[in-house]
Amino acid sequence: MVDAGSLTQNVILLKEYHLCRHCLIRQADVIRRKKAAANTDDDIDDDDNNKIQGEGRVEKRTCYLCKGLFERLDEIAKKALLVTKQYRQFNTFVVGATLPTQLYEREDALRARLKIRGRESIKNHLTRELGVRIAKMLRKNADYSRPDLTINIVVGKDGDIETSARARPLVLLCRYIKRERGLPQKAEKCPLCLGKGCNLCDGTGLNDSESIENIMTKHIVKITGGRSPKFSWIGSEDPYSLVLGKGRPFYAKVSDPKVRKPKQHKFVQAGIEGRIMEVLEEVPYTPERFLVKTRIACSCDRAIAQDDIKSLRKSLAEVQAKFENRSKIVVKKIHSVYAKRIAEREFALTIVADGGLPIKQFVGGEQYIEPNISRLLDAKCKCTAFDILKVDFCRL
């Protein structure tokens, strides 16, 4: 049974701390519940309030716990509203806060003295109150599990307030078509920020050498207003290979985007045609299976007969190619093959195979892969060039 006398003593002790209304309620709710358990009144009565507030007088002293922070809620909310202006497309938000350790220490000491447990912390109380005000100003909903925008409030030791905002990363499914030879797919990181994005690289995180990644990054950053996209490539090709058809798909995860629903979806630069296909929730956790149609130009150290062409068509259709990759045996299925003699010692292959088949290794057979073209023809063969004709996801 809770001692009613000790409750009255707790109420009297609260008076010593000169708490603001917000901090008082945060502590006094416990007293209400304890009084009910002690079979006293269900609420704090007028006499209790007089004892806490000083016989009905509202003292103009600074709150012992928050040092006037809760009296500035409207001011802080308006300041937080300013940092959201640059984010034009978001539906939900959440408020986070960083407070000086002294605020926590004072409240912990008070609660230890009054034996108050299980109450809301000063940080949670502050962010909740700010969330209510900002939601009314923005006419948007707070979302604590997956917000589009996170508003951060930093309170300094002297009570100065700093506000910032950061959007949840945006995931895009994109494709690119490569119509000119010579561009590598991937770029090197910016030497200053090492990929994080800075003024030197205009927020891309990459150096200024020409590459498909660099071109795609600049346009995606411009369209979304974000920073340093991270790419998940669906396969790769040589710098001198073309990528035709609908293009090669890839995922781009953009940090801190200002636009979540891009209106511009297509761009062209230096023979690269990029397109934003879809906005996704997340990059797939497991690598997606895909099929690639590839045209391969081959040379041979001996003359190619028509029987060789027929042999390739027969030997490669619906077979599984096995090769070693990082000390593991990988299996890729070749679904279809078309072979054609081009010159005395030259021929072309058009194959549809699982993504990830090493084309040059498949033709030359220098490293372990079975079957390979050189072994099937019993001759030294070489891949002189290859182009990607089509890339499609293989979704079950």
Image (spheres, grey):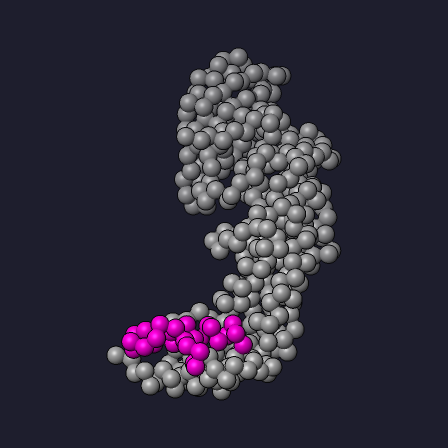
The picture places residue 37, in percent across and down from the top left corner, at: 30, 74
Magenta residues, dominant SS class: helix
- For the point 55% across and 33% down, which residue is it? 360
State left or right for residue 271 relative to residue 74.
Answer: right
Q: Looking at the picture, tell me which residue is in the foreground, 151 or 179.
A: 151
Q: Which residues are magenta?
A: 20-48
State left or right for residue 11 relative to residue 344.
Answer: left
Q: Looking at the picture, tell me which residue is in the foreground, 10 or 211.
A: 10
The picture places residue 53, in percent across and down from the top left corner, at: 51, 81
Residue 301 part of the magenta segment:
no
Question: Is residue 254 in sight in this rendering?
Answer: no
- For the point 59% across and 62% down, which residue is it? 152
Question: Is residue 176 in sight in this rendering?
Answer: yes
Residue 45 part of the magenta segment:
yes
The N terminus: image quadrant = bottom left
- For the point 65% across and 66% down, which residue is it? 75
Image: 261 above or below 123: above
The picture places residue 309, in percent across and down from the top left corner, at: 51, 16
Q: Looking at the picture, tell me which residue is in the foreground, 5 or 325.
A: 5
The C terminus: image quadrant = top left
